[in-house]
Amino acid sequence: MATAAVVKGLEGVVAANSGICWIDGYAGVLAYRGIDIHELAEQSTFEETTCLLWHGRLPDRTQLDEFTQKLIVARRLPSEIFDLFRSVPKSATPMEVLRTAVSALSFYDPDESAVDHDSNVRKSFALTAQLAMLVAAYDRIRKGNAVIEPDPSLSHAANFLWMLHGTKPIPAATNAFDMALILHADHELNASTFAARVIAGTMADMHSAITGAIGALKGPLHGGANEAVMKMLFEIGKSGGDPVDYVKALLAQKKKVFGFGHRVYRTEDPRATHLRKMSEQLSKESGNTKWFDMSRRIEEFVKVEKKLNANVDFYSASTYTTLGIDLDLFTPIFAVSRIAGWTAHVIEQLDDNRLIRPRAEYTGPEYPVKYVPIDHR
Ligand SMILES: CC(C)(COP(=O)(O)OP(=O)(O)OC[C@H]1O[C@@H](n2cnc3c(N)ncnc32)[C@H](O)[C@@H]1OP(=O)(O)O)[C@@H](O)C(=O)NCCC(=O)NCCS
């Protein structure tokens, strides 16, 4: 059977019907369930946005209270997960630990293999609450600190910062982090979401789909880019050199500048607009604008030199650093937010499932090649 022409990297290929997220890459529009990301970033909360992604519309006050309560009740981890955290090698990165822990959580799910709608929604509450707990708890354990119990009086964003730092966050930090969670919550068929849908499409369970998604997010071309950006800023800071010279040298070696470019956007990534503002505001408030200033100079240069715009990962790096978050937690934190979108897509996929199984254009030796027994080779 003849196959269609191959589009490398599936660029522009439409692979699913979805009512969750809409992007216009030329106009720089991103909308969840039709609502512009700018309105959500400025007026919504992570809880409300997650409810919107899962259920398709904004909740009224009673529905939001109920939703928030369910998320709070779901803040529980089996004790075996803490034992797992204490047993991993010191060299394990938080992203590897997160991937392994999410997979391990399926052992303790009462209905691990169920893929019906209600089970998927229940698992979505559990995993959304748990991912934040996993990231915070592992960071505490690896640093020899006591694990902090979640505080039911705190929002998802505030509770994460509380469990991570062991101090109640100031409103400005909570608001900034909440906005970062909203901005990262979904992005149509990005690589990790597509991976989740492919896995869910086999009728495998939610934990398998999310474990696979975390694996896909880890790469520096996807979610791992925020860590790569901060590594670059730290390296420039340490050397004391000029940021533009550093980037010029990268480009001269035909290397990529992490935090720039996008498969879909041909104009500014609307999430970067908010993160730039947030990074500037937080750094001014903290009295240290070094990372923001450096980022701004790099952005201006790359925009002129390569006609590339900053993406979501570029300013999230300096934002998280200013919030006192360690570099190797940046990508796990991306997962703490993107779990909302991954689960929304798994629910949608399984509500109207068909196995996702494309074809490959064969480029190997021409058929038939004769099998040569080993003694005659
Ligand atoms: C996001 C990304 C993977 C999109 O990839 P893509 O759609 O496959 O685009 P390509 O990698 O084919 O890039 C197209 C061209 O732009 C260049 N380019 C793209 N992003 C670049 C970057 N960040 N730095 C330097 N050059 C870049 C490529 O080198 C390529 O140039 P060429 O045609 O001369 O070979 C890519 O822009 C990238 O690697 N960015 C850095 C990683 C990153 O920030 N990822 C997070 C995305 S939100």
Image (cartoon, helix red, strand yellow):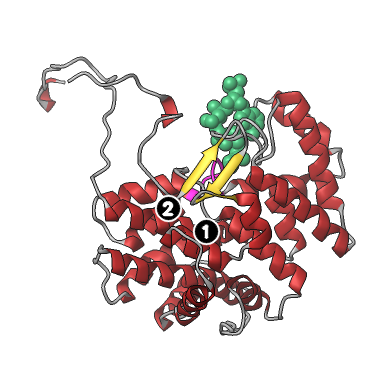
**In the picture, which quadrant includes the N terminus?**
top left
Q: Which residue is mark 2?
A: 213
Task: Examine the residues drawn in magenta and state their main secondary structure.
Answer: loop
Question: What's the amino acid at mark 2?
Answer: Ala
User: N-terminal of the two: label 1 or label 2?
Assistant: 2
240 sits to left or right of 122:
right
Magenta residues (range): 217-223
Q: Residues within 10 Å of mark 2 (few under 14, many from 20)?
A: many
Residue 262 visible at all = yes
Disc 2 on helix, strand or loop?
A: helix
The picture places residue 62, in percent across and down from the top left corner, at 50, 77
* Residue shown at the point (47%, 68%) measured from the top left: 128
Front-most of residues 266 and 247: 266
Q: Which residue is mark 1?
A: 335
Question: What's the amino acid at mark 1?
Answer: Ala
Instruction: Report, in whole angstroms, how far the alpha carbon at label 1 lies from the one at label 2.
Output: 9 Å
Instruction: Indicate yes or no whether the magenta region holds residue 290.
Output: no
Please determine whether, in this image, residue 276 is positioned above or below residue 303.
below
Q: Quadrant of residue 236?
A: top right
Disc 1 on helix, strand or loop?
A: helix
Residue 330 visible at all = no
The picture places residue 348, in percent across and down from the top left corner, at 34, 54
